Image (cartoon, coloured by chain):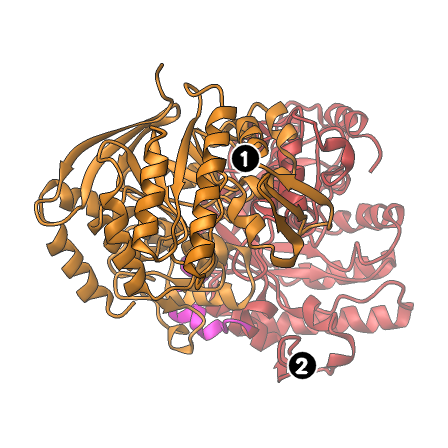
Chain colours: A red, B orange
């Protein structure tokens, strides 16, 4: 029985856990480590899919989309009828879908957790729904993503040890139900999610439980949920050691430039984050010399490129003065151009990281990047 | 002395006043009749300029931009420093700028008209400004558009004859001041604007006064301002007869599909309208079978193209169900895809009109189009 998604390790950095691999999927082979742009509602906001495909030098190979959102609108049955999410949204690369767990847990008073699953109310119209592990996989089966995430509970930070332990054990039981329910493993692969909060022994327990299930990949969930970055890196360090070297490792919801470097250094293969697209719409750009708020008055007559070291469409064709004008005029093109730049920046940075690992100079590249970028 | 813009007539329809010509400009040769997409604030909303360039079969060759808006934000001096509007906004085709007259007259209580010009307050911050014929040309010189429009008064509808007569005579005096002020006629061409409301004798008077100034082109202003369409067509009929055959004729602010046909039939060469881009953002599409409101529930599971007879990017790649989902989810991509379709539709329709004139079957094509489109 062949799994839809398989990971192959090519090279590990001689001084860190950074590693270079490929992830084979039904919609193409991904070079890892990889950054995945987020397309919450079946679109990477303000981007045509062809433009996403052309980001960086090699193009984005995989995007993330959200089960919770698509289940509510337009409804997963409509996407199934459309022939699946790839066809519905005109994306021929790979797709990873989350399980909806994180979103329904984020609903606060609008949801109630039981052993069976989570009852919740729609943030759109207040209607009542229930997500169980089986339901999450049913929806993700309808979407037809290459990688499906298990239905888990992402415990908040801070949370006491007992709560986190009970929660991760339920997450393991839910993972077994997900695996049991999912049938066509040659079409879609299920990734398990490690939880355990900031407790390293619980992280180990969670890892051991999920690795036993021999899944094609594993994610680290429950980080970057409010804990200090240093604590996150410390926990991450120990997490990776409990995961098998021959499976992909995905750090969920993390993707600021520094986190990419710190995650890769600790052995992570996959990242996603809404930050680059969200801050773009708010007029903020990642650049090689740090973040830039384009509305700042100092850019009024600045006819240089947004990032002097960037070769993206936005930086090749437009000036900061023009981008500032668009942003202040509430023009849609502002979101389009800044989103394209920010995603290009992260995709290209990850390409550079991959090349640095291949040439065994990851730490040197990291140092160069940090020095030029300035504070994070 | 060579004018920046020159018109050449190639062929006139045997049964109507429809005509086929070319307009030579410093930024390319335009095939006429032509539809000009509107880029009010130095961007065709929700479109990259390269995408505008690729609309239809031949691509859009000219866009319109607004002097009033660019004067206020970012300011014409900034655009001058950027190297002109073409460079600022990354558009290598031709640009026509309006004079700002129409916008300042539309400000109502915020403006005051004198023989010298119009004093007005900014709709953005309430600051006080003055547009005169000289100021309008100064701003348009800074923008560097290929075609500048004269500073005129567009009389409202209804308006009494005496008012319209006094107004058009002042418009002529203002036109003389514009012509006097504008120096580099080899870089930019000034078009005069005929006024006269719905009074055919006043239209004739206006035409005779402005044609005397021997400008490279003439516009018909003050139509489509609230009068019934039949009255507009009747007035238009008489207008064109007073304009020279060897100069371009531009019907300002008109561009719905039926108006394109009716205008071309009456001898018009150039059109502009915000309608296709504005209704796109509101979820409405022009199609070969009439207007479609994409949010309509009947499109929920409609996996066919937006327009079954369209070959634009949107219609080739996406279904009505997907477009409806994007619109209902307030996704920016909705505006991008519907705008691209609507502009493609008008640009391609105008290409078809040009071909029909060449083949002397304009009326036949008009009949076909109207029958398929249904009511307007």
Q: Is A81 one of the magenta-colored residues?
A: yes
**Nearer the observer, B253 or B362:** B253
Vertical placement of residue A350 versus B338, above or below = above
Task: Please identify the dominant SS of the magenta region.
Answer: helix
Vertical placement of residue A188 versus A167, above or below = above
B158 horizontally vs A345: left or right? left
Write the residue at 65% across / 40% down. B130
- Helix, strand or loop at label 2? It is strand
Vertical placement of residue B336 versus A303, above or below = below
Write the residue at 66% across / 75% down. A123
**Nearer the observer, A201 or B326:** B326
Q: Which residue is mark 2?
A: A121
Q: Nearer the viewer, mark 1 or mark 2?
A: 1
Q: Residue furthest bottom?
A: A128
Q: Position of residue B344 (x, y in %)?
A: 34, 49
A252 horizontally vs B357: left or right? right
Q: Position of residue B199 (x, y in %)?
A: 34, 56
* Range of residues picked out in magenta: A73-90
- Helix, strand or loop at label 1? It is helix
């Amino acid at each position: 029985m062949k799994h839809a998604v398989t990971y192959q390790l090519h090279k590990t950095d001689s001084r860190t856990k950074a590693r270079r691999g490929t992830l084979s999927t039904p919609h193409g082979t991904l070079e890892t480590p990889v950054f995945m742009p987020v397309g919450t509602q079946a679109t990477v906001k303000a981007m045509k899919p062809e433009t996403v495909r052309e980001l960086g030098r090699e193009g984005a190979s995989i995007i993330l989309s959200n089960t919770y959102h698509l289940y509510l609108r337009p409804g997963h049955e409509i996407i199934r009828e459309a022939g699946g999410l790839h066809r519905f949204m005109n994306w021929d690369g790979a797709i990873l879908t989350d399980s909806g767990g994180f979103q329904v847990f984020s609903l606060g008073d609008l949801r109630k957790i039981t052993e069976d699953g989570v009852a919740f109310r729609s943030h759109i119209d207040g209607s009542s729904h229930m997500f169980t592990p089986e339901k999450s996989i049913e929806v993700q089966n309808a979407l037809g993503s290459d990688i499906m995430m298990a239905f888990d509970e992402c415990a908040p930070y801070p949370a006491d040890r007992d709560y986190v332990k009970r929660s991760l054990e339920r997450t393991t039981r839910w993972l077994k139900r997900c695996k049991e329910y999912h049938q066509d493993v040659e079409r879609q692969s299920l990734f398990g999610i490690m939880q355990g909060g900031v407790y390293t022994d619980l992280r180990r327990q969670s890892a051991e439980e999920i690795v036993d299930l021999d899944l094609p990949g594993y994610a680290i969930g429950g980080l970057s949920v409010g804990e200090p970055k240093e604590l996150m890196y410390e926990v991450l360090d120990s997490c990776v050691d409990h995961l098998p070297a021959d499976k992909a490792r995905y750090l969920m919801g993390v993707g600021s430039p520094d986190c990419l470097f710190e995650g890769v250094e600790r052995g992570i293969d996959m990242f996603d984050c809404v930050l680059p697209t969200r801050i773009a719409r708010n007029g903020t750009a990642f650049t090689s010399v740090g973040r830039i708020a384009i509305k700042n008055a100092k850019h009024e007559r600045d006819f240089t490129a947004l990032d002097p070291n960037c070769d993206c469409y936005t930086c090749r064709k437009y000036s900061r003065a023009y981008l500032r004008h668009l942003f202040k005029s509430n023009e849609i093109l502002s979101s389009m151009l800044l989103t394209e730049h920010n995603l290009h920046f992260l995709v290209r940075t990850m390409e550079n990281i991959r090349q640095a690992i291949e040439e065994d100079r990851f730490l040197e590249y990291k140092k160069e990047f940090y020095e030029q970028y300035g504070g994070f």
